[in-house]
Image (cartoon, grey):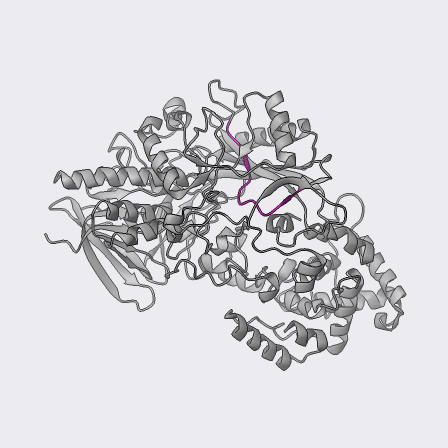
Amino acid sequence: MQHLRHKQPRATRREVLAGAAIFALATGLPMPASAAGEAPSPRIALLLKTVAQIVIPRSDTPGAGDVGVGAFLPLAFAHGLEGTREPWRGAAAPGLLRADGSLRHDLWLDQELNRRAGRDFLALPPAQQAKIVAQLDAEAFPAGPPPSAPSPWVAIKALILTGYYTSEAGASKELQYNLIPGRWDADIPLKPGARAYSSDWTAVEFG
Amino acid sequence: MDYEFDAIVVGSGITGGWAAKELTEAGLKVLMIERGREIVHGDYPREMKAPWELPFRGRGDAQRYKRDHAVQMLNRHFTEWTEDHFVNDRENPYELGPDSAFTWFRSYQLGGKSLTWGRQCYRWSDYDFEANARDGMGTDWPIRYADIAPWYDKVERFIGVSGASEGLPSLPDGQFQPPFALNAVEKSVREKVSARWPDRRLTIGRTANLTQGKEEEGRAPCQSRDICNRGCSFGAYFSTQSSTLPAATRTGRLTVITDAQVEKVDYDPATKRVTGVRWVNTKTRERKSATARIVFLNAGAFNSVHLMMNSASEAMPGGLANSSGVLGTHIMDHANTLSAVALMPGFEGRTSFGNRPTGVVIPRFRNLDKADGDGFTRGYSFQGGALQSGWGRGKRQAGIGADFKRDLRAPGAWRMVLVAFAESLPRASNRLTLSKHLDPLGVPQLEIHFTHGAGEMAALADAKREAAAMLTASGGQVLFGMDRPGPGGTAIHEMGGARMGHDPKTSVLNKWSQAHDVANLFVTDGAQMASSACQNPSLTYMALTARAVDHAVGLIKAGAI
């Protein structure tokens, strides 16, 4: 399914469901839910992939857009990961709220980035795009105490990181993944350049 | 009367498994009844799944959780890997009394909470068994440390507890396997705390994870994964499946029924004995019953009490074995909060390998030989540990792009966490009652009345100060701490409701976990507790279960029951 998503980030709902069914057969797990009627438009799919890749770009390992985070985000938004289906308390332009009062983070991001760009964000050169996302990010994480009403970007960024570092490449190539360490070494030197373990569950949980 | 079984055990969790093992090994023919589904040891479908193999990457479907697991999802061990090891709250409702808050975390399945427990194993001391007598809260325990010590020995040897002997009067040493080691930061904090406060000791958590395999029992040593709650096909942590169930099964005298919710314990007023139990198959709704010479209730503290209340009869209108009227009262948890988190500079060149399945503990130091608690008479202890942060730190930081990615590649700064568990005082007003509302099977729901008291608040205020003081003295920079507990149930140490005591007028059980009113009824899970101490309680439940079985078998052999 990674392969499918990677090649076809604009997969139709039917294709996503087909992929999900294969996933379920292969793993014996319940079929993953879809983005529940919120399958992204081609534009939103491209936007999410682009922004994910800006946050975690390609280096000697793939970037977040490369590993399907663009496809993970609509699923995560629709199913409320990182609190994205809680009632939105901030100001929001009409058309961005669901019937349950939660914010459509994908649509907000599109609108916000276009507003900051003064035109179509996706039409900007990559350096300009990165600059705008950096500004959005800096304002969402100001120095000092966190703002009382967090920017929707905080949840979006958290889900980009989640999507990346829980992908096979993010978890096991960018970081190290070891399901069965087999021993506990309590106190050893940390070698320069050592990569953290994505399978250090407590560290991941507590950030 | 001809009984179908010598003994019926209701529940298959930590104490139910122990009751079944001990009863069958004593030669009794036993029926163990579990309300949840069967889980076969080794058949843990998500145990080995990588995050990328799960639809929601291990985080789970938050929308579905809100609908079906509104309470269970608040447990930090509830994840996409473990969700099948916790109940569906919609299908298993309970009520709260006015002004009450209680998150009731439950695991209805073969093995019960033995599959999901925190595995911390601590003995009680006489500071704990004498606590009620000393400050007059609750009723005196009818037992002391000497009564339970040999049973602690037996349980620790069998389940396998790793830990370090420290010679502390408030936390007696046990029969330990070799301990997991402290990491660089914890070693330093241990030294600095001991130097400044000679009566305080940071030691490794005593945990039911094997550091030496028990090959004869099919149990391998811990693989340092720290994903125990998914189920461990290595059998490295104690669960019913890994340990007591195979032992009981080997005797050839155990019958197990799953998907069977016990609705009533039958009582015969002529003989003043219970005669067996009735249950409903949760899938087919078929109703069945069985008879036995003795009955052990091990359904989990609140559910054993619930069953006794629902077993009211003409002869016992206030509930089974409730002539005292205290059934359901004096329930407890521990008042539980995050007392301090500190950055621990100076260890940047050190790290660890593997995932240790336990943290550290700083045992109780307050109100031992002198009354030094400011506004509280009991104690608290800390659990926690030092860890290097992972990629999750990126969620709280500004930054994007190549530099950000590079930064998150390395382990983050060392931090140390101390979580307080404060003793919960036994109060009559904290109690279980039957609700007017019925569950989906038509059984009256349990209603939980619970608030933390002023003593617990004072203990946590002290814990916050002392945690900050110890971490600061150890070179840490305290980031934050809390002194308000989570709602009742947060510690998942719910207990009491059928307390043990000397006096049948003020307690439900005698010193053998045997009902004062019904000689062949034993309640050996958390319901029997007369006080809560501040230690994780499961080891004490197991020891009391083994002790109760020994007594019951003696009574049977003597023809007394």
Tell me: A130 left or right of B302: right
Q: Is B355 contained in the magenta span?
A: yes
Q: Is residue B328 visible?
A: yes
Q: Which portion, as a residue range, is magenta?
A: B351-364
Q: Residue at x 63, y 61 (%)?
A: A81
Question: So how many labels did they put on this image?
Answer: 0
Compared to residue B58, the image places residue A96 above or below, namely below
Q: Residue furthest top?
A: B370
Q: Is residue A18 above or below residue B380?
A: below
Instruction: Please state which of residues B62 and B217 is positioned toward the viewer in this rendering.
Output: B217
Q: Position of residue A128 (x, y in %)?
A: 89, 65
Q: Position of residue A60 (x, y in %)?
A: 78, 61
Extreme residue toward the front, this view: B215
Residue A164 point in image, percent of width and height = 70, 62
On the image, the x and y values in percent for residue A71 come to 69, 71
Q: Nearer the viewer, residue B241 or B454?
A: B241
Q: Quadrant of the C terminus of chain B?
A: top left
Query: Relative to B373, does residue B516 appear above or below in the rendering?
Result: below
Give the answer, above or below, for where B208 lies relative to B94. above
Q: Quadrant of residue B549?
A: top left
Q: Is residue B521 left or right of residue B182?
A: left
Q: Is residue B329 visible?
A: no
The answer to which of B55 and B481 lies nearer the viewer is B55
Would residue B528 appear left or right of A206 to someone viewing this image?
Answer: left
Rendered residue at 41%/27% (across/down):
B125
- Within the magenta stretch, is there residue B266? no
